[in-house]
Structures are given as structure tokens and as C-alpha cells.
Amino acid sequence: MTSVFSSIVLPKGGRFLRKPDFLKPRPSDESLSTESKRPLDPDELLNAVAEEEGADLRDLNTALGALVDIFPDVQPDVFREMLLSLSDESRLEVVTEHILRNGAQYIQGRYRKKPKDDKDTPARHDALPKDETFRSEKYKRAVKDTLYLEFKSLSHSSIRAVLAEHNYSYALAHPTLQHLASKSWRATITTFFARKRPATSDPDSHPHVEWLPNTAEPLNLLPYLKRTGCSELDQELYRMYIAPVLARQNQERLDSDEAMANEMNEAEAEEADALFDCECCFTAYPFEQISTCDSHAGHFICFRCIKHAANEALYGQGWARNIDLTKSSLRCLAPSVPECQGCIAPELVRRALCTERDGAMNWQKLQERATSEILIKI
């Protein structure tokens, strides 16, 4: 018997000796918390991703990008399957020849969908997205470990099936897994008894996001990304979870600083008796929030009245009354007799509108509508 079993030749790759995923130990929260807790530098991540990408993977992605440019109507997964089944030599030329000769045999109806709004025009597809390219084995392992830790209520086979369907892309597979986890009976029981929130896309509950006190602002917490061991996945997680939170906190900080600066400026102007009365609403404002018309009278108009007049012109019935098409700007709002024929400088109108969140969009709409009205009259 010993001689019989000793004569069995195992595969060189050791496929039968490799541990399946359910026997591999999961990374614990304690081991993840010991990772570096400094904010990730996007430039550093880009350099690390370039170093991790091998020469063969770069060649495959280059060939895939060329095939997508040649056949923009075909889904990229068709080319991925064909490129992996060929050797390194002339695989781009071989795939191109096979598609031209027997395209229906390989494509099998896998074409890119045309936009719903443009059915008559030919579909225009952008360049190959990152989620459709070939992924390294290191990235695949890191994505599986991360999703195993995040979706503990799902089986490993379900997670692997979803990853295989979405080219092992974390960003594409996460919404599908989140939907499956919310519908599973395990998640329902866990949520009911353990009072635990189900897995969501919120960075507050993500296992790889840790919130630590901010030294500059102790009341606000800063998100830190726990390293996954793969720079490409770290970059993707940073872009999905960390960057939006930092941008929102930065915008809130800028808004609060601007509000405080306006209050201090108005208080100092009131102490120095340097307030100007708006000749439309008759309210006192500092110099920074006042504009004048280009007439000889030079009426003072505040930014608040300018915003109300512009919004009424765009979304109400005040276009003919408030907009002067000869100067593509706002008319003077001062209630004078006779009526003032002056206009407010476009730069002042833009400054007044841009003090709101959607001010830049309103200014663009105002310019586009004025231009279209002028072209129609011409």
C-alpha cells in the first residue's frame, strides 16, 4: 500500500495542497488596528500601485485597451477571456483576427448597451475604465479578505461568485453584496438579536475605517484607513470612503470660517460707521456686500437683492423686467423716479450669486439664457 500511494504524482502547482478559502484565517480587527494610522497620500499610493503592477499585467492591460479602441461596441470581458487563453506572443494580433473572422462565435451577444436617450445616434464609449482591466493576484486576495471581513453574514462562495461576475472589482461588487446581505436570514437574525447594524456603504461602519481624534480640532474625528496590504485596494478604499469625508469636513470648515469672518467684518464696519444702505431693501451692509449700478446716480444694491432678482428671472416671471439683453446683465433694482436705466456689472452679479452653494450653476444658466435670447433676436 505504501508503494502504491508513493507512486502517485501530484500536480506541480500544488493545487490539491492549497488551503481553501474557508480554512484560511481571517484578519482580525486587532491585527488591522495595528496598521499605520496616518492619512494616506494619494501620490504615494499611485507610486505603490505602479510598482505592484507586473510587466505581464501591464502588457495584458495594454492589449486590452487596444482591443477596446478597435472594437468599442464589444464588452471588455470578451477580450479578457481571449487574451488569457493565448500565449504572450502576438496575442493582440491573434485576438483581432479571430474577432474579425468569427466574431459571433466569441462575442455571443455581449455588446455594450447604447444610451437610452440617444437611440438614433451611434453609441460613444469612453476609454477602458479601471474596473474592467486585468487585476493582479495580490489585489484579488486583498479584495476577498476585505469582503470576507465586511460581509460575515454571507458565505465565501457567494462572495467569490459576485467577485467573479464583477471582475474582482471592489467598487462594483460592494453594492451587490450589500443587497444580498440585507436580504439574507443571517443578517436579519443578527440585526434583531445583536442590535448590530447591517453592512452599508457608510464609512462609520466600515471595518477598514477607523475614527481617531483630530489634534487641531478635538471635537471632530478624522477617518483613517487601515492598510489592506494592497496599495491598489487602499487607493480604491481611500477614494470611496476617506476622500468624501475629508472633502465634506473641509467644506464645512470653510463655510464656518466664512460665516465667522462675515460676522466680524460686519461688526467692525458697524463700529467704524462704514455701513452702506441698500437702495432696494433699505438694509445696511458692509462694503464687501454692496454693488452699484453704472448710471450717473450710482445706486447701491446689496448682494442679497441681486440674488433674489436673478432667481426670479431664472425660475420666475421676472426675466423681462430684471435682465438687460443689450448688456447681458441685471438691471438696476433701485425704485427711483424716473426709472433707472443702469445695469449692475456682470462681475458683481457673479460675485453675488457665487456666495450660495449653487451660485455658479445659476450664473452659468443666466449667461446661457441671455446668450440664447440674443441669438434668437438677431
Image (tube, rainbow, N blue to C red):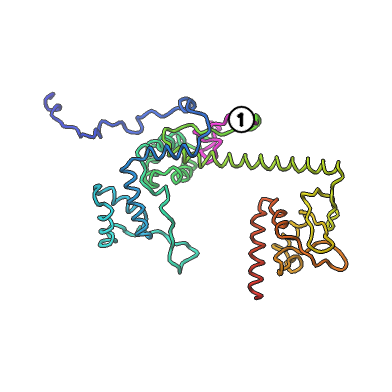
Q: Which residues are magenta?
A: 193-216
Q: Nearer the viewer, residue 268 or 115?
A: 268
Image-based side of 270 in relation to 5, left or right: right
Instruction: Estimate how packed mark 1 is, as few (under 14), some (14 to 19) or many (20 or more) residues with alpha carbons within 10 Å.
Output: few
Q: Position of residue 108 (x, y in %)?
A: 31, 58
The residue located at (46%, 43%) in the rendering is: 174
What SS does tag 1 mark?
Answer: loop
Q: Nearer the viewer, residue 240 or 190?
A: 240
- The answer to which image quadrant residue 280 occupies is bottom right
Q: Is residue 19 above or below residue 118?
A: above
Image-based side of 22 in relation to 90, left or right: right
From the image, which quarter does the N terminus lie in? top left
How many badges with numbers are in the image? 1
Identify the amino acid type marked 1. Asn
Q: Nearer the viewer, residue 97 or 298?
A: 298
Q: Is residue 197 above or below residue 321?
A: above
Q: Position of residue 96 (x, y in %)?
A: 28, 58
Indicate yes or no whether the magenta region holds residue 206: yes
Q: Nearer the viewer, residue 156 or 306?
A: 306
Q: Position of residue 205 (x, y in %)?
A: 54, 35
Q: Position of residue 359 (x, y in %)?
A: 67, 54
Query: Which residue extends farthest bottom?
Result: 378
The residue located at (44%, 61%) in the rendering is: 124
Image-based side of 228 in relation to 337, left or right: left
Q: Which residue is mark 1?
A: 214
